[in-house]
Amino acid sequence: MTNTTQDFHPTRAPERIDMLDAIRGFALFGILLMNLEAFNGPILQAMTGINPSLHGADRLADAFIYIFVQGKFWTLFSLLFGIGFAIMYDSAARSGGDFRRIYKRRLWVLMAIGAAHAILIWEGDILVTYALAGFILLWRMKNDAPPRLSCILMVYCAPLALLAFTGAMAGNHDDSGNISEMMAEEVRYQGHSAYMATLQWRVGYFLLNLGNLVILLPMAVAVFALGVRLHRQGWSRPAMSVDDGGGRVALYCYCAGLALMVASIVIAPDVSPVRIDAVFAAVNVLNMLAGLLMCLGMFFGLRWMWARPVFQKRLALLAPLGRMALSNYLGQSLVCTLIFYGYGLGYFQQLPRAWHIPFALVLITLQTLFSIWWLSRFSMGPAEYLWRWLTYGKRPKFVS
């Protein structure tokens, strides 16, 4: 069979794995809950651990999100991205399609969507990082063998080693003046400026933020590769029985990650981003290791729950949300910036921390209901439709 892009088609609805869509929907809730602090205030302030100025319910909510959400759900979403990569790779292998050519186009489109999201809607975009990580994974994937676990761990830990080295060498570096100025600039543009002024600021922020790829990109590549490995080992499919070992793996991973989070809090519950020292490095290293382990714990735990009808029935409600993951992710940014930013309703820094959890629950519920309604009429979300159209060069079927 001749290898052409026409031989390779996107995953059709009957071929989709509902369990993965449900986990993806669950991950979207965590991502929203994590991002709300950055929607409602400066992004830099969302990287400081448990805010010591908060009290009562606000402090409890801040601690809960820091311990159980921050850094765990973007990792879970990345794991699913890697699994999706492997599923498409296998589909192309079966059909004889030119996977590399079409997947490169898919990543270029994702990068364009991510850049538009970062500049036009919200500066906290993750899609550009995903696209770059996808290119690296595509470059390194030579066959259908599972990536080696030792290589995955080495890539994931490389930026952690860099953080540790930087903290050790920096001594007690204080960059409070520069960081304070940057945060004040964020507040000025996000909370009080018109859209065009904010847009100009976002362009500069987007370029400046590319420096964070030194830390984030290797971690994303490693988690993508881990997702490929899990798929190759059969973990991306629903469990064949209720006792296939996944429950124990979930418990071990999550408890180990939680222990690392507790250790980081014992060292320092709040970490100022203006001071780069050994404490800053140690807390961040522990957080990143905890994020990976707790992400795996959630993945295996949700897979274990899916094997039990009583849980599967409830988790399945999130599957439509996950099927429209890109549309819903972009939708979260659009809704929240219009609520909080100065060119919208102007509630910037007005929503108490304790209200972030019910706010996220209400918005994710509305998105779930909207996704159910939308998919009853259309075959995919609007952003997914655009993504596939530009990737495959022809309009996919849209109306169900």
Image (cartoon, grey):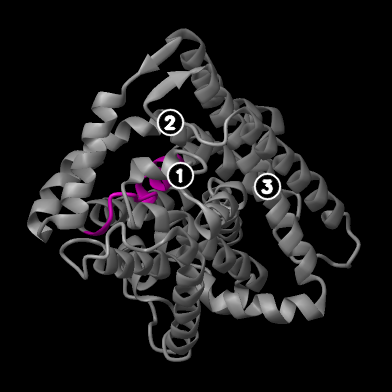
**Which residue is label 2 attached to?**
272
Instruction: Choose top left, top right, bottom left or bottom right for residue 315.
Output: bottom right
First to last magenta residue range:
121-133
Q: Nearer the viewer, residue 222 or 233?
A: 222
Report the residue marked by disc 1: 134
Q: Residue at x 55, y 47 (%)?
A: 66
Q: Is residue 267 visible?
A: yes
Q: Is residue 8 visible?
A: no
Query: Closer to the camera, 324 or 202?
Result: 202
What residue would you read off at disc 3? 294
CA distance separating discs 3 and 1: 23 Å
- Number of dots carrying numbers: 3
Please give the label number shown on residue 354.
none
**Residue at the spot 70% in from the left edge and 58% down from the top edge:** 236
Q: Residue furthest right?
A: 243
Quarter holding residue 176? top left
